Amino acid sequence: MPLIKREYNGKSPEDFRLVLDFEGMENPQGIDAYKSKKGYEALTAVLKEKRKPDDLIQLVKDSGLRGRGGAGFPTGLKWGFVPKDAPEKYLLCNFDEGEPGTYKDRYITEISPHMLVEGMVISAYAFGAAKSYVYLRGEFYDEIGWTEKAIREAYDAGFLGENILGSGFTHHMDVYTGSGAYICGEETAMISSLEGKKGQPKLKPPFPAVAGYLGKPTVVNNVETLAVVPWIVRNGAEAYRAFGTEKSPGTKLFNLSGPVKNPGCFEVPLGYPLKRFIEEEGGGLLDGKKLKAVIPGGASAPVLTAEEVENITLDYECLQAAGSMLGSGAVIVIPEDVSMVDVLDNLMHFFKSESCGQCTPCREGTGWLGSMAHSLAAGHGQASDVERVAAIASQMAGKTICAFSDAAAGPAMSIVQKFPHEFQSRFG
Amino acid sequence: MSQEQSVQLTVDGREVSVPAGSTIMEAVRKLGEIEVPHFCWHPGLSVAGVCRFCMVKIEGVPKLQIACNTEVREGMAVDTIAADVKEAHKWALEFHLINHPLDCPICDQAGECELQNYYMKVGKYTSQMDEDKVLKPKALDVGDTLVLDTERCILCSRCVRFEDEITKTSTLGIFNRGDRAVIGTFPDRRIQHNYSYNLADICPVGAFTAKDFRFQCRVWFLKESESICPGCSTGCNVKVFQNGNSREYFRLKPLENPEVNGHWMCDYGRTQFEHLNVKDRLVSPLGADNSALSWSDAAARFGELVKSQAGADNGKVALVLTPQHTNEEFSAIFSHLKSQLGREPEVFVWREATEERDSFDGILFRGDRNPNTRGLEDTLKELGVSAKECSGLKDVGLSQAQLAVVLGPEVERAYPSLETDLAVLREMPAVVYFGNHRSQAAAGLSLRVPTLVFTEKEGTYVNHAGLKQTLKANARVMPSLKSLTEFLGGA
Ligand SMILES: Cc1cc2nc3c(=O)[nH]c(=O)nc-3n(C[C@H](O)[C@H](O)[C@H](O)COP(=O)(O)O)c2cc1C
Ligand code: SF4
Ligand code: SF4
Ligand code: SF4
Ligand code: FES
């Protein structure tokens, strides 16, 4: 069962189950199973005790919860940006889960979709949204069913709809399915898509908290971010801060993939050593292979060499200092027998396919890098090509409407800079 | 603008003050001396922020920012020439060009193409592109007036925004994504409205080209001058393009005037160069038998016809005016007749019988297809004349006149019932017809005298809103042509 293997920071492995509390339970998905372990108690308390919305925002601020969709933006702060007096506001749950290597959000809804629903209703109450949408990746057929079923059950049990639990608070929730474009995971592209437009990011400012879905104040949060809110409401900010680091409180779901013995989804306290994660939770590499590199946070995160991995801890600040990012928490292990030239080709093919194409540096840069990586992998490259990859990537970064261009540039730059020798042996 | 609503900033050390809420791009434009390179921004459209060309550096801000969507702040120090800004401009241009087909030798935009212009201003690099270019559909027939080359398109989205925001026809979209993104019309849609040529204007490259200009003339042979469109009572300000050597006119484009037409003009207005060229012009006076007369003979004949009606006890003389000439011309012909006759002629204002004078399309185009309805009214009032306004010339009392002096329409298209009205004139004992068309419509009248067209004369038009606008004179297509006052001076 994906759980950390042994005591960490004086806590036993079982203590680290905030989000995956229901893992291992027989039929955990239904509302009764959820209620058997404190499910909907947080929402009930909030509404019965008529907790002040601002107090909830403050609570989430105090907990230090940071967005789990990739950017790590402080959640309470985001809610605080929403104008108080706006008559119409929206909450959007980002369940696009497009980052290659990531499968944590689907795991949450596989085990406890009600945790997401409860978290969404509380969050909506905190900043005053009467309507929310779960924007769900179109190919996630099972997850669409699970989420819709949970929403229906919540309506039937009176946790959704008009005048919830007699509190005067009304909230409606719907699922909206996308069509599998990676870019629709970017929050403003998601809003465009939800509005029925071409799924491409919007120019900021204005930011969604001020003018989002249909031009109304909108909060976009990731599934995991919203799912942990009930726990924080039940246990308090201090209890949450007991996990993780000063700047990265709490636990986070990590998805381990690549040739390791135990790939899977693990709930791990932030600040946890990456090396220990791969060796103990992952059981090390298959067939005694040596580690070459790790992509620590999904395809958008610059790669780390095996030496760098030695001292990395899984939190926002350490990975940022190392020139990479925690991202979505998808840890992709690359063994010694995989060529970084092929890794570059694979990644650049992805970004070339998925750029929405509106910003020139991203549209042209991803296409260019895709072609170059392909010709390098096919053995047609030369030394100047490697320099060109770095030059192109450096001009794509920080110059576009959304972070996609940076997400493509970072990995390209890190691969050519950290593994130049691997390219030399493939020159034509 | 009150003091507290304006913001003071510097751009490359130069101070400028703009209304709060303006963008850096607007501040730079106001300053005038500096240009931040841009493709997608257009002053008449919403901000898209997609080309990422307009990068500037702002003191205290770590990353470069786009000028078109960054609001000014008090005391902001903007730098458009720092080394990293220049590098960013160069790269942005290179990104735009890597998949560009470089059709310049066969592209009508060459010479006025923003890719070419910016390459000279901020580019001048050696291309680093070795890979194959992305190929896209070319020479698409997307409307009656336009051809679209999607490969030349730099995806600035100006045309899409024009269709969405100005004409609200939403014919265009950008389809697919990444470097396969391509401009195009929605299925089964064509660009069919009265503002289509504006798309060719705002397209910074040669993706949209105008059918009536394709392969006609290299733009560097064209001389540009300013004028007023004679197509309707809006009076759009225009740029007129004429071959510097042959004097042939090739096209009209809008000239920005926020008070009148903003950045646009209509397609009907665009055609107002067709009647200017020699092949369609009446170039010498003609007699009743359609034989050419010298200017001096024509002046003498006109003088005799008028003199024969002089004196109080003589028959009626009609002066028939169309609202297509300048205030000065109206006044000159009236005063000439008055002094020669020793009394006032009876004045008729000749309007097209079928016109829907008050119609308006909500953008620019008006049902009053005359550039100077207001000017004619004002001039007559100043002269103290009460004229008879006629909807067509039938049964308006012209038959009682012995002589009619007519300033016919410069734009005959605005008078679809011209033949019927000329038939009325043909019944009269004597008609002197001033016109600029070679067409046979006015054949058989006693005397036909050529006039100058709007691009060849100085004078005043007053538009529908009462705004006085001044025409400037270009060289005449034939040096022998005479203006109305020159002609009257000889008569
Ligand atoms: C290209 C791109 C793809 C993204 N994909 C996702 C995604 O699949 N799921 C997600 O939650 N956030 C994704 N994000 C991040 C969202 O834009 C946004 O920051 C996030 O949903 C906010 O929620 P959070 O604050 O709870 O993390 C993506 C961002 C970018 C730039
Ligand atoms: S950076 Fe790329 S993906 Fe993001 S908006 Fe621009 S073109 Fe689209
Ligand atoms: S066709 Fe022209 S105006 Fe339209 S997006 Fe392309 S370059 Fe821009
Ligand atoms: S709107 Fe009227 S004045 Fe303007 S271009 Fe058209 S015809 Fe000419
Ligand atoms: S002009 Fe500013 S991004 Fe295009």
Image (cartoon, coloured by chain):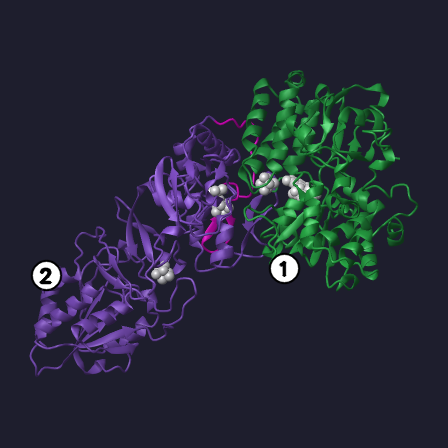
**Colour displayed for chain A in the image of the structure:** green
Q: Nearer the viewer, residue A382 or B222?
A: A382
In the rendered picture, chain B carries what hue? purple
Rendered location of residue A26, percent (x, y): 93, 45
Total numbered labels: 2
Height in image: A281 above or below A114? Answer: above
Locate the N terminus of chain A by quadrant.
top right
Q: CA distance from mark 2 to mark 1?
A: 80 Å
Q: Amino acid at mark 1?
A: Glu
Question: Which residue type does callout 2 highlight?
Answer: Ser
Disc 2 Cβ-to-ligand 4 distance below 8 Å = no
Q: Chain of mark 1?
A: A
Mainly helix, strand or loop, the magenta region?
Answer: loop
Residue drawn 24% across the image and 57% down it: B471
> Is residue A185 something that shows in the picture?
no
- Residue B34 lies, with reference to residue B417, above or below; the image says above
Boundaries of the magenta span: B127-152
**Chain letter of disc 2 in the image:** B
Q: What residue is disc 2 on?
A: B296
